[in-house]
């Protein structure tokens, strides 16, 4: 399968899921009106049907439903193995179950209307459910599963977005409140329908026997399609491909199975942080024998392998579906690394985010500490670390780590990119102010005042929990972090408190005229980086308080 095809399927999957989510949400809101009265439910349904019973609405809805089901079948077909993580299994299972759960309701309402023009109102439908506890339980389960599938799909799609962290609590609240109100309205409507007088309808609907024949025929066809896919794809085949693992184990699998799926089917531990989507390199293997003639590397795999400088004999186990026997060596340790990858929360398992980074360091502190008692040095450093922590956290950031007499802070883990840049500048000002207060407190004990050097830069970074055991912490790595460190070194070289990249200042929406500008050469970059040199960080406080007012003459 080409990378273009994969991307197209992903886009169709998202688009069809959004259509279905919009439909289900509207349906649930309509159900919730039953808390008030059946009349309100009917009024809401009339407006609801204007969209979904129109020709464009019908094509959109049932096209999305068929596309979503077909893509779920495709995902099952492409797996090559029924052994998979629980999360992936639920995603496929829910996608396949939706048509099955909704079939009776759709056929009994929409199909009957399309064939005969007969409209089963809320009163009639709810009264029929009231007398059948099994139908009520089945429909309630359908509501819950449909909503859960939609919410899970939305969450998996949006969780990597920078802005989603800000609205996640609202998303979670809606995810709980909407189905609760829908079920309450649904049950209230059933109770009211049982007490209401029958509503005569001049149109004649399908006989119940015919209606249920259609429903049962759909169930049979639905189950046959799924069973056919499973039988054709997963029955043992004679032409097995043998995957030999360095160390002695050999796994014989059907053609079309990826190396990662082969590992899972045989119970062989194999790291895959991204879940086998080609978005990380943790599942990579070295092909020791049998590389010639294997399927070519596609664009997504090329990009991932290039990012780590992998050799020509290294492939991603999740992407390579071998066409003949081969011998492989997994390159990532499957011990504690595998355990950590499986246990890490999704939000911190490793994702690219746009962040602002602050590096700070006390200048000439080594010489100062040589003249003091060890306990005094520790006491002074702890006071300094307290200043750093308070300045960073009060500005909305987090201290990544303390290194000697320096510190690294990150901004943007839970905020927007522009806000992160502004927070980083605010933290730099507060930190400079804190150092001034610290100097005032220790003036009698210091031969010379403490001086700080800070570097600020913003851009993409890989954020995740890294380390081992108790030394594991949320941190960031990447060119952005390295550049911020370079700017802190330039601040020392220039004998100033702050050096900040022009990109960060512009994103923060502030300006402070009169600063010195220097073009810094960054290793690995063709272009230079424009940096702003600030003698005293407190000089930019006015610009942060009032972006329109220049802070430096």
Image (cartoon, rainbow, N blue to C red):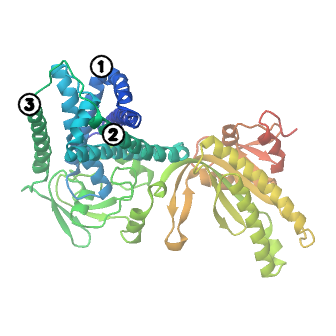
Mark 1 / mark 3, whichever is N-terminal: 1
Q: Residue 427's mark?
A: none
Q: Mark 2 and mark 1: span between their CA atoms?
A: 25 Å
Side of 76 where 426 appears, left or right: right
- Which one is closest to the eye, mark 1 or mark 3? 3
State how far apart marks 1 and 3 are (Cα): 26 Å
Write the residue at 53% across / 48% down. Answer: 353
Check the picture and name the quadrant holding the N terminus.
Answer: top left
Q: Answer few, some or many: residues within 10 Å of disc 3's Cα (few below 14, many 20 plus, some between 14 and 19).
A: few
Name the quarter where the C terminus is drawn: top right
Distance between mark 3 and mark 2 Cα atoms: 26 Å
Left or right: 412, with 226 as reference point: right
At which x and y percent is residue 379? Answer: 78, 75
> 241 and 104: which one is in front?
104
User: Which numbered circle lies on residue 186?
Assistant: 2
Q: Which residue is mark 1?
A: 54
Instruction: Give the mark, 3 or 2, whose residue is nearer the N terminus.
Output: 2
Q: Earlier in the sequence, mark 2 or mark 1?
A: 1
Residue 519 sits in which quadrant? top right
Q: Nearer the viewer, mark 3 or mark 2?
A: 2
Element assignment for label 2: helix
Is label 1 in a helix, a strand or a loop? Answer: loop
Mark 1 vs 3: CB contact within 8 A: no
Left or right of residue 20: residue 378? right
For residue 210, the mark is 3
Provide residue 383's location: percent of width, then percent of height: 78, 69
Determine contact: label 2, label 1, CB under 8 Å.
Answer: no
In front: 341, or 528? 341
Looking at the picture, tell me which residue is in the foreground, 509 or 390: 390
- Establish if 182 lies above or below 287: above
Q: Is residue 449 visible?
A: no
Q: Residues within 10 Å of mark 1 (few under 14, many from 20)?
A: few
């Amino acid at each position: 399968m080409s990378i273009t095809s994969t991307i197209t399927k992903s886009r169709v999957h998202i688009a069809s899921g959004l259509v279905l989510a919009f439909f289900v949400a509207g349906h649930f809101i309509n159900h919730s009106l039953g808390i008030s009265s059946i009349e309100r439910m009917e009024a809401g349904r009339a407006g609801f049907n204007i969209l979904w019973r129109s020709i464009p609405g019908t094509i959109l809805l049932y096209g999305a439903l068929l596309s979503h089901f077909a893509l779920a079948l495709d995902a099952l077909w492409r797996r090559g193995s029924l052994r998979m993580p629980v999360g992936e299994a639920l995603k496929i299972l829910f996608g396949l179950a939706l048509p099955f759960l909704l079939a009776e309701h759709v056929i009994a309402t929409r199909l009957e209307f399309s064939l005969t023009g007969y409209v089963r109102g809320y009163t009639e439908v709810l009264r029929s459910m009231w007398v059948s506890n099994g139908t009520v339980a089945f429909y309630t389960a359908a509501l819950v599963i449909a909503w859960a599938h939609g919410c899970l799909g939305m969450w998996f799609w949006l969780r990597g977005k920078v802005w989603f962290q800000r609205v996640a609590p609202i998303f979670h609240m809606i995810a709980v409140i909407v189905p609760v109100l829908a079920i309450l309205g649904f049950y209230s409507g059933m109770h009211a329908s049982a007490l209401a007088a029958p509503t005569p309808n001049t149109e004649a609907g399908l006989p119940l026997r015919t209606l249920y024949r259609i429903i049962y025929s759909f169930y049979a066809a639905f189950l046959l399609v799924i069973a056919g896919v499973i039988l054709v794809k997963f029955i043992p085949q004679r032409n097995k491909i043998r995957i030999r693992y360095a160390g002695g184990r050999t796994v014989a699998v059907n053609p079309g199975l990826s190396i990662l799926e082969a590992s899972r089917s045989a119970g062989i531990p194999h790291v895959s942080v991204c879940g086998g989507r080609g978005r990380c390199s943790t599942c990579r293997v070295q092909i020791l024998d049998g590389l010639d003639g294997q399927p070519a590397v596609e664009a997504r795999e090329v990009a991932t392998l290039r990012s780590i400088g992998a050799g020509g004999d290294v492939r991603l186990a999740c992407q390579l579906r071998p066409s003949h026997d081969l011998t492989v060596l997994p390159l990532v340790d499957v011990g504690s690394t595998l355990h950590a990858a499986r246990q890490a929360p999704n939000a911190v398992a490793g994702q690219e985010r746009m962040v602002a980074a602050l590096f700070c360091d006390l200048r000439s502190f080594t010489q100062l500490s040589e003249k003091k008692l060890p306990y005094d040095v520790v006491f002074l450093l702890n006071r300094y670390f307290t200043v750093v922590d308070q300045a960073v956290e009060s500005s909305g950031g987090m201290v990544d780590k303390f290194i000697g007499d320096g510190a690294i802070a990150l901004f943007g883990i839970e905020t927007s990119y522009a806000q992160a840049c502004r927070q980083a500048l605010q933290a730099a000002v507060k930190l400079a102010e804190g150092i001034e207060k610290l100097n005032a407190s220790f003036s009698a004990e210091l031969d010379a005042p403490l001086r700080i050097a800070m570097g600020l830069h913003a851009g993409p970074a890989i954020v995740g929990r890294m380390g081992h055991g108790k030394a594991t912490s949320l941190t960031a790595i990447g060119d952005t972090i390295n550049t911020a460190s370079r700017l802190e070194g330039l601040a020392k070289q220039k004998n100033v408190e702050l050096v900040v990249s022009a990109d960060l200042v512009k994103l923060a929406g502030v300006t402070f005229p009169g600063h010195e500008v220097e073009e810094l050469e960054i290793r690995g970059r063709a272009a230079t980086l424009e940096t702003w040199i600030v003698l005293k960080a407190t000089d930019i406080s006015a610009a942060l308080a009032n972006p329109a007012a220049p802070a430096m003459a």
